[in-house]
């Protein structure tokens, strides 16, 4: 599913440039994606679009988000830390954070890998027509931190 999400991000510069779901499914199938993955990706994107559309108010929260144990277990320490970093850097609002958390929890994966969380964030920003700045884009779409940790020097 995440290969499809990355393909969509790289192929369609705006979400409104994407064809309707039925046509998109045919295009994805023609490119070589599996029908099950296409179906999962389209459902995931539809849910994302509904949530992103419902949270039109960008509420600025100055409070701290506390994760219940089930959320923390499902997300993992790296994902929670990265979400907090993005929010403190102003990349995510509190309502966007909640969408990212919900979409990550919708996965059948625990803990959610940092590379997948980055794709979720990119897809949320993409679905809202926002582009991360160049430095944040490198952090989101660059080398996977799980495979190539950064060296501090």
Image (tube, rainbow, N blue to C red):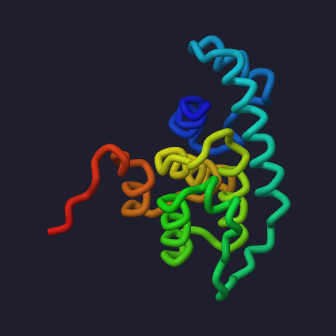
Q: Residue at x 75, y 25 (%)?
A: 39
Q: Position of residue 55 (x, y in %)?
A: 80, 65
- Image quadrant of residue 84? bottom right
In the displayed structure, 94 sits above or below 1; it is: below
In the displayed structure, 34 sits above or below 48; it is: above
Q: Is residue 68 left or right of residue 113?
A: right
Q: Position of residue 117 (x, y in %)?
A: 55, 51
Q: Residue at x 60, y 68 (%)?
A: 92
Front-most of 69 and 90? 69
What is the count of numbered marks? 0
Extreme bottom residue here? 62
In the displayed structure, 78 sits above or below 5; it is: below
- Image quadrant of residue 151? bottom left
Q: Is residue 93 left or right of residue 152?
A: right
Q: Position of residue 147 (x, y in %)?
A: 32, 43
Q: Quadrant of the C terminus?
A: bottom left
Q: Position of residue 13 (x, y in %)?
A: 57, 42
Q: Residue at x 71, y 19 (%)?
A: 36
Q: Quadrant of the N terminus?
A: top right
Q: Is residue 99 left or right of residue 81?
A: right
């Amino acid at each position: 599913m995440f290969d499809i999400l990355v393909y969509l991000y790289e192929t369609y510069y705006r979400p409104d440039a994407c064809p309707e779901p039925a046509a998109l499914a045919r295009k994805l199938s023609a490119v070589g994606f599996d029908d099950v993955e296409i179906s999962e990706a389209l459902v995931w994107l539809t849910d994302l679009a509904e949530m992103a559309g419902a949270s039109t108010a960008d509420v600025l929260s100055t409070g701290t988000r506390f994760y219940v144990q089930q959320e923390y277990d499902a997300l993992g320490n790296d994902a929670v830390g990265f979400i907090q970093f993005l929010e403190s850097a102003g990349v995510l609002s509190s309502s966007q954070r909640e969408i990212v958390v919900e979409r990550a929890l919708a996965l059948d994966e625990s803990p959610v890998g940092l590379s997948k969380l980055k794709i979720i964030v990119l897809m949320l920003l993409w679905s809202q027509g926002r582009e991360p700045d160049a430095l944040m884009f490198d952090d989101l779409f660059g080398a996977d931190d799980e495979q190539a940790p950064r060296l501090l020097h």
